[in-house]
Amino acid sequence: MARRAGSSGAETAEKVRNAALELFARSGYAAVSMRAIAAETGVQAGAIYNHFPTKQHLLHDLLVVHMETLLKAWEEADQPELEAPAALEHFVRFHIRYHLDRSREVFISYMELRSLEDENFGVIERLRRSYEAVPRAILERGAKDGSFTIIDPQITTMAIIAMLTGMTTWYRENGRLSLDEIEAIYIRLVKRLVGQKEED
Amino acid sequence: MARRAGSSGAETAEKVRNAALELFARSGYAAVSMRAIAAETGVQAGAIYNHFPTKQHLLHDLLVVHMETLLKAWEEADQPELEAPAALEHFVRFHIRYHLDRSREVFISYMELRSLEDENFGVIERLRRSYEAVPRAILERGAKDGSFTIIDPQITTMAIIAMLTGMTTWYRENGRLSLDEIEAIYIRLVKRLVGQKEED
Amino acid sequence: MARRAGSSGAETAEKVRNAALELFARSGYAAVSMRAIAAETGVQAGAIYNHFPTKQHLLHDLLVVHMETLLKAWEEADQPELEAPAALEHFVRFHIRYHLDRSREVFISYMELRSLEDENFGVIERLRRSYEAVPRAILERGAKDGSFTIIDPQITTMAIIAMLTGMTTWYRENGRLSLDEIEAIYIRLVKRLVGQKEED
Amino acid sequence: MARRAGSSGAETAEKVRNAALELFARSGYAAVSMRAIAAETGVQAGAIYNHFPTKQHLLHDLLVVHMETLLKAWEEADQPELEAPAALEHFVRFHIRYHLDRSREVFISYMELRSLEDENFGVIERLRRSYEAVPRAILERGAKDGSFTIIDPQITTMAIIAMLTGMTTWYRENGRLSLDEIEAIYIRLVKRLVGQKEED
DNA sequence: AATGAATGAGCCTTCATTCAT
DNA sequence: AATGAATGAAGGCTCATTCAT
């Protein structure tokens, strides 16, 4: 049998991307075989190669798309007119929601950097830096206008990102706290980190 | 030739453990072959099986030893008589130093949990919980005696650990800040997270 | 898009034949993929199957066409009225020129016989025998009329063909000797093989 | 099962070489799979890699060993004190006997040069030139001392080698002529090519 | 007549593991 | 306790071929 009626290229590529995302997140890039991805996608392994030239390209593609989507999502969410405190809160909300929706992407984009070959690694690394620049800029703005008392902008940025992203590790839909509650707590924790007085 | 003069069993086991640690940390469990570990150790692959029954056991062994050593190290470092604020500072220092010294163990103990088969997974997970109980207990002590204003002990614990451990990701020996400086910054950040007034 | 404007069926079949010829000669039948032939032709692999039912048919077609063209070319070149010595010289000239022009066909017709499935093999083998009969008949004619002193017609025939065909292995356009010079030398060598006195 | 009692490394390597030789000669390098070689050898495909790092190395090894054995065999057979005519006859006998004994090696050493990667190709090409230098030197010696009347030493050399080697293509043990008879015929043909008077 | 997507088999190679030595 | 050779299963990828479009 060749192509089944009704299947289209773009559709398969998307299904492959999804299957790979799920499996890479669950078991790690190296532990997932092309055959496993194919099985999850509902095609033979060879068919994947009509859409991605190598397994490495597939990972790269996943990571690039994730980072670019993240950056674009922020661009759209960004409200540049906000003062630093409101901007920071806005960013935290955005980051939590976005990363929870895409926990698999987040996970592999942190875990599988080492699985990328050199050149691909650089591309992703640069995109990631772009994203880290977002909270950092807010921190520096708040530091300048006196609304924050930052200890060290660079380290505080990394601390905030690590703290927020760590959430994807343990968050469960039916846990003790609702997402809204968790979000509220994290916002307060971040305010403390940047030395902003709490109103409550 | 069987055994090379001067090599003893325990010595080889240790060299294997070291090689595996290094390689797992660099490339991930699934991406590292027994042959690669053997090559790094200076023996043939078959020889590893005189010391570890399977690759999975080797990983398990590494993680158990790491977690147990960490717990034992804390037991020795622990100064139960300290008040909560001093105890927290003590813990932060301990955690940073210990984790920086063993960044490879830390890394794989976070990354390769998923590579563990079910039973082994449980063992490590329990040990990890034991360690997380340490800062959590300090937080709760400080909350009770009024020296901290904790928002949520559970989340704050996870936040602190994520924040501190994240450091292993970007710390470089010759970076902008010395280890002492970084440590001092992190201590201040942690104090903020627990709502402790800064003396300085 | 289906067919590109300006391309016609017969045209594509010819381009495929040419590409296959080139690639089979360079790398061998088994080492050349239909995709490679398609790429060289400027179409997708599937398109080849509109012109040749299988890869094996393509090879067969190439060899049959080559042998038939060769035989037909000889039929046209043949000058039956020539005496044996002149006929032999005529044949040598013909063989060298023809084989040099079609070195790729010659090469694969000698190399890829083994890649042919049984039935196809027989067809080509028979055509080849027909061609070998040409010099052999000349030799026997010359032997009978006393102009040659043949040691053994069969072996001498094979020796002449091997000798002449070997040329395609090392001949280079810009070598030490021109084609005319090489031809002259080979004619003299062949005359020696058949025991014909040299006039020069 | 690991190793079967009684099997040794060198033994297996030799069996692999033999199987590969046979199969490469019969079907060509590209058409023969490692599995096929393994099956013929009586091991699993993976076992071959204990002896040869890649399929390409296996081919290269086969060709190098063949050419070196050939050169060494000639060194031992060579009788430098012989006059050119006797030396040539000696060489022809040697070449025919040796090439008939090793027709598979001869065949692939001519056919599979193109299957060698560049560097490997160079090694074999050089060895081959060394061998071609042998008859050429004899021809030049005989030309100088007047026992031969060579038309062109280079081309005559190639012609002789092509003629003799072509024999491996059609020789059958139970053919019309015995090996001794064929040999005698070829010696006479070669003498004609070098312009030596026949005594008989 | 051509494309693009798919299949199912097969390829070279590597792997965890075993075992005679 | 180590080597070296082997197994059997898999892994990434390619291939000849098919077929809906």
Image (tube, coloured by chain):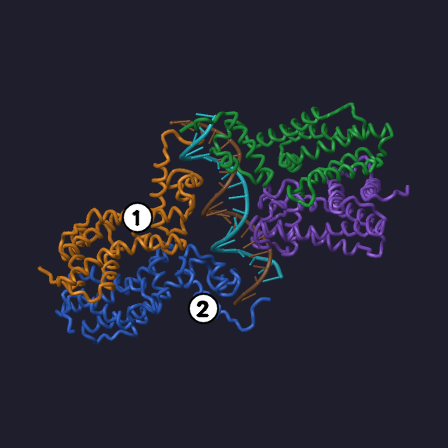
Chain colours: A orange, B blue, C green, D purple, E cyan, F brown
Q: Which mark is residue B14?
A: 2
Q: Looking at the image, how many numbered discs can be counted on the residues? A: 2
Marked residue chain, label 1: A
Could you say whether the residue bearing mark 2 is in a helix, strand or loop? helix
Quarter of the image holding residue C71? top right
Give the amino acid type for the residue marked by disc 2 in the picture. Answer: Glu
Image location (x, y in percent) of residue C92 = 74, 33
Quadrant housing the N terminus of chain C? top left
Could you say whether the residue bearing mark 1 is in a helix, strand or loop? helix
Height in image: F14 above or below B142? Answer: above
Residue drawn where x is 24% and y is 58% of the image = A161
Real-space Cα separation, disc 2 to disc 1, in angstroms: 41 Å
Height in image: D63 above or below A12? Answer: below
Quarter of the image holding residue B113? bottom left
Height in image: A49 above or below C136? Answer: below
Q: Which residue is mark 1?
A: A66
Image location (x, y in percent) of residue A22 = 33, 46
Residues C148 and B193: in front is C148
Image location (x, y in percent) of residue A110 = 32, 55
Q: Nearer the viewer, mark 2 or mark 1?
A: 1
**Visible in this render: residue B192?**
yes
Is residue D104 rendered to the left or right of residue B136? right
Q: Which mark is residue D179?
A: none
| Label 2 close to label 1 by CB (< 8 Å) | no
Query: Are callouts 2 and 1 both on one chain?
Result: no
Give the amino acid type for the residue marked by disc 1 in the picture. Answer: His
Is residue B135 rendered to the left or right of residue B53? left
Quarter of the image holding residue C141? top right
Residues B16 and D165: in front is D165
Marked residue chain, label 2: B
Residues D26 and D197: in front is D197
